[in-house]
Image: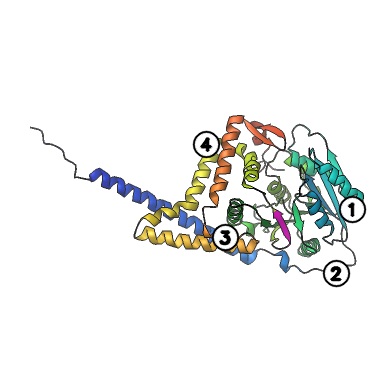
Amino acid sequence: MAAAITTPRGGPALALARDVQLLALLFVSLSALWWTAQAVAIARAVRLLPRIADMPREARPAWPRLSLVVPARNEAAQLEAAVTARLAEGYPELELVLVDDRSDDDTGTIADRLAAADPRVLVEHVSALPNGWLGKVHAMHRGLARARGEWLLFSDADIHLAPGTLERVLAWAEREGVDHVAAIPSVSARGPLVAPALAGFFRLFTGLARLTAVSDPASKVAIGSGAFNLVRRSALVRTPGLEWLKMEIGDDVALGLLLKRSGARQAAVIGEGFITLEFYPSIKVMIRALEKNGATAPAPLLLAGVCALVVLELGFLAGLALDGLAAWLALFTLGLAIVTQAAVSRWLGLPRWPALVPGLSVLPLAWALARSTVLAWRRGGVMWRGTFYPTTTIRAGMRLGAAAKP
C-alpha cells in the first residue's frame, strides 16, 4: 500500500503569508534606499548650489546688451502681466523678443500693443511651422534670429522676474566665467492636486539630476531650465545651433546638453524669490501638457518606469502593516520623506503642505505619464502645440539620452 503524502495544516497559507512579508520587506527596503539617496543629494545641493539671493547687485558704468527671447503660443491670459513685469525689472540694456507662435487667441495682438508702447520690445509672428521642427524650438530659433544681445535669455512666457534679477545673475556669470546659467524657479500653484504634483516633481528633479555636477567641466551632466536659460552668445555660436534641437521635446535640458558638449561652462542656480513660475493653472492642464512625453520611449518601458517610481516612492507604506524590522524601517522612511520634502519645498519656495503626504505627490505625475504613454501608443504619436508628430519622428529627433554628438 502506498504511503499517503500529507501537508501540514495551514502550510500553503503560511507559505503565502511568508512570501507576502518578504515582498513587503523588499518594497520597504528599496523605498528606504530611494528616499535616503534623495535626501543625501538634496542636502548636497542645498549646501553647494549658488542662490540668486546671495549674488550682489553691482553698479556698473556699462552693461552688455541682453536679449530676452520669449516664445508664446496662446498665452493671452498671462502674457501682458509677465512682459510688463520683465520690462520693469530694471536691467539697463534689455531687449525683449516676443515670438507669437501661431496663436489663435489674442497673444499676437497683445504682443503688438506691447511693442508699440515700448521700443525695447520686438515681435516676431510665426504663421506656419516648417516640416521637421517642433513648434517651441522653431519659435526660439526665429526669436534668436531677431536678437542682438551679447547675452541671450530663453524664458517661457509666464515667468516673472523680481527687480534686479538680471543684473545679479549676469554680473555673477561674467565674474565666474560661466557661459550658461539655468535657474530653478519658485513655483506658484493652484488646486489641491497641482501643488503636491509640482512639489514632488521638483524634489525628484533636484534629487536625481546631479545638479552639483553641472558646473564640473569634466562631467557629462548638463542642465537646462525652460524658466531661465541664460546663455552667452559666443558660447552658442560655437554649437551647431538650435537646429540641432529642432525635434527634441525636452528642449530646455537639451539646450544645456548642446552647450555642455560644445565646451560651455554651466551652472545651476536657485532662483527662489527672484524667478517665479505658475507652472500649471490646473491638474487638467498639467496632464494635457505631459502628453508630449508619451512617445519618447517604447510604451512597455515607460509604463514599467512609472510602476517602479510608484513602488520606490510609496513602497515604505507596506511596512506599516507589518511588525519588527519592517515596521521600524517604514517609520524611519516616512519621517525621512517628510523632512526631505519639507526641506526641498522650503529651499525652492514651493508649497510646504505636500510634505505631509510624502510620496503621494507622485500619483498625479504617474497617472499623467501613464496616460500620455497609452495615448501615444494608440495614436502612433503625440499632439503638441497644435501639430501631430509620429512616434518615429519624435524618437529620430531626440537628443537627450542619445549618443549623437553635436
User: Would you say residue 274 sits in the magenta stretch?
Assistant: yes
Q: Is 360 situated left or right of 185 in this image?
A: left
The residue at which mark 1 appears reads as 120
Which x, y percent locates residue 104? Answer: 78, 37
Q: Earlier in the sequence, mark 4 or mark 2?
A: 2
Q: Which mark is residue 306?
A: none
Q: Of helix, strand and loop, which one carries label 4?
A: helix
User: Are dots 3 and 4 in contact, CB under 8 Å?
Assistant: no
The boundaries of the magenta stretch are: 273-277
Which x, y percent locates residue 270? Answer: 68, 61
Q: Is residue 402 visible?
A: no
Q: Give the residue at x 76% y 64%.
A: 176
Q: Earlier in the sequence, mark 3 or mark 4?
A: 4
- In the foreground, 209 or 128: 128
Q: Which mark is residue 353?
A: 3
Question: Badge 4: few (under 14), some or many (20 or more) residues near its Cα, within 10 Å?
Answer: few
The residue at which mark 2 appears reads as 59
Q: Of helix, strand and loop, which one carries label 1?
A: loop
Foreground tag (1 vs 3): 3
Q: Earlier in the sequence, mark 3 or mark 2?
A: 2
Compute the Cα span from label 4 to label 2.
Answer: 56 Å
